[in-house]
Amino acid sequence: MSLFRKKSIDALMSESGKGAALKKELGAFDLTMLGIGAIIGTGIFVLTGVAAAEHAGPALVLSFILSGLACVFAALCYAEFASSVPVSGSAYTYSYATFGELIAWMLGWDLILEYGVAASAVAAGWSGYFQGLLAGFGIELPKALTSAYDPANGTFIDVPAIVIVLLITFLLTQGVRKSARFNAVMVFIKVAVILLFIAVGVWYVKPENWTPFMPFGFSGVAAGAATVFFAYLGFDAVSTAAEEVRNPQRNMPIGIIASLAICTLLYIAVSLILTGIVPYDQLGVKNPVAFALNYIEQDWVAGFISLGAITGITTVLLVMLYAQTRLFYAISRDGLLPSLFAKVSERKQVPLVNSWVTGIAVSIFAGVIPLNKLAHLTNIGTLFAFTTVAIGILILRKTEPNLKRSFMVPFVPVIPLLAVAFCTYLALQLPATTWLSFGGWLAVGLVIYFLYGRKHSKLNEANGEQKQVS
C-alpha cells in the first residue's frame, strides 16, 4: 500500500457534499471579516512590544513588511487552491491531492499544532488584557488563578483563559452564521480602536525615538519578522471555511487577499507610531499599545485600547477554534482520525462533538502553558504549511493543467518559489529549541499515522486494500 496515494480533485469535491453537510452561509464580506478577525489580535496588541524591545527596535516596521511579503506570496497560492478545491481542511486537503496521504497527514498534524497552540496563546493574551480591565474597576483575581503554571511566580492556572475558550466553543456550536455575525461586530470594534490609536498617537511621535533605527542589525529585523509572523496567521484559517462558502470560486480569493492587505497596512501604521511614541527598549511589556498611551498620558484612550484588545483577541480565538474544528472534520472524514470528529449536527449543521472536544482540550492547554513558550512553535508550523502549499501549486499546475481555476497565481513559478524562499528564511530565524520541539511533534504524528491513520484511511476501502495493511 502506497504511503503517497492521492485523492483526486473529483473525489474531494464529491465527498464534501455527502451526508449531513456543513451549511453554505458565508460570503466574501464574511470571509474578509473572518480573516481580519483572525489576523488582528495578539500580534498587534501583545507581540509588537516584545519584538521591538528584544529583536528589531524601531525597525519593527521592516519586520512586519518582511513577514507581510512572505504572506502575500503564500496567500496567492492559498487563493488558487481555495478557489479550485473549495473543501474543508485547508493545506491538509490540498496536500492530499498533490503530495499524497502521508504528507497530507503530516501537514494536517502540523496544522493541528498551528491552530491549537495559536488558540492557547491567544487565550492567554486575552486573559492578561481582561485582568487589566478588571483592575481598572478595582477587581483583582487571586494570583494563583491568573496565569499559567509557574509556582516560582505563585501562579498555577489561568482561569480567565479557560473560561473564554469554553464560551467561544459554545458560540461555535450555535451555527456558522451566528459565529460570523458575532465576529463581524467584534472586528468593527477593534478596527475602530486601532484607528483611534493611530489618530491620537500620531501627534506624539518623536522621530528621535526611531534612532538608532536598526539597533540589533538586520538579523534582529529577521528575528522580529519570525516573531511577529504569528500576527499573520489568519488568512490561512480562512481557507478552512471553504465548504461553508457561497460561490467559493469567487469569494475565497477575495476573503484571503483582502483581509491580508487591510491588516498589513494597519500593522505598518501601528508599529511606526508605537516605536515613535515610546523608546523601543521600554516596550517589552504585556500590553505595549495601552502602555504607549499611558506613557503619553492619554489614559482615556488606553482604556479603549484594552477594550479593543479584548474584542480583537476574542475574534482571533474564535477563528482559530473554528479552523481547528474544520480541520479535524476534514481529517476525520478521510478516516485518519476517529469518525466522531466528522459527525455533523443535523439541526445546527456544525460538527458538535468535534467542537466541544477541541474547546476543552485547548482550554486545558491555555490554562497551564506559558504564552512565551507558544508563539514560536505556532510560527514554525505556519511557515511549514505555507511552504508546502506553495510547492503544491507548482505540482498541481503540472498534474492538473486542465483544472478549472477561477483564480490563478500570477508569474508561476516565480511567486510560489518566492513564498518558499521567504518562509524558509523566516523559519531559519527561529530558535533551535523550536525546531527540536517541532520535530518531536512531527515524530508523534508519524507514530499516530502508522498505528491508526494508515489502517483506517478511507482510501483502503476505495482501493480494496484493507487486508494489505502491514
Image (cartoon, rainbow, N blue to C red):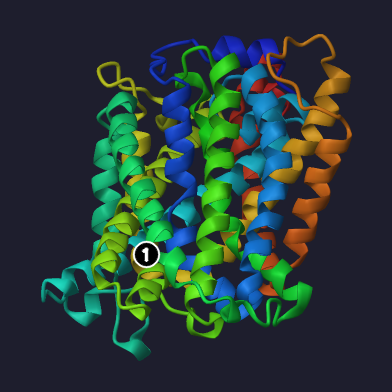
Q: Residue 175 versus residue 311: which sits nearer the camera?
A: 311
* Residue 440 in sight in this render: no
Amino acid type for the residue under numbered disc 1: Ala
Q: Residue at x 59, y 61 (%)?
A: 228
> What residue is pinned by disc 1?
124
Quadrant containing the N terminus is top right
**Label 1: how many residues lie within 10 Å, few (<14), some (14-19) or many (20+)?**
many
Whole-percent x, y for residue 172 in the image: 31, 35
- Above or below: residue 407 compared with residue 330: above
Q: Is residue 231 left or right of residue 291?
A: right
Q: Which quadrant, please, contains the C terminus?
A: top right
| 364 relative position to 166: left or right | right
Say whether residue 119 is left or right of residue 419: left
* In the image, residue 29 above or below residue 450: above
Q: Residue furthest left?
A: 138
Residue 384 at what x, y percent from top left?
Answer: 70, 49
Count of numbered marks: 1
Q: Against 166, is 307 above or below?
A: below
Q: Residue furthest front?
A: 203
**Residue sitting farthest toward the bottom:** 152
Q: Quadrant of residue 104?
A: top right
Mark 1: which secondary structure? helix
Q: Name the spot of residue 251 as percent of width and height, x first.
A: 54, 20
Q: Nearer the viewer, residue 339 or 286?
A: 286
Give the residue drawn at x 41%, y 19%: 22
Taking the spot 31% from the left edge, 74% from the top edge, the residue there is 147
Q: Residue at x 28, y 65 (%)?
A: 301
Q: Quadrant of residue 225?
A: bottom right
**469 or 110, which is in the foreground?**
110
Please state if 238 lies on the left or on the right of 369 as rendered: right
- Residue 443: percent from the left, percent from the top? 68, 56
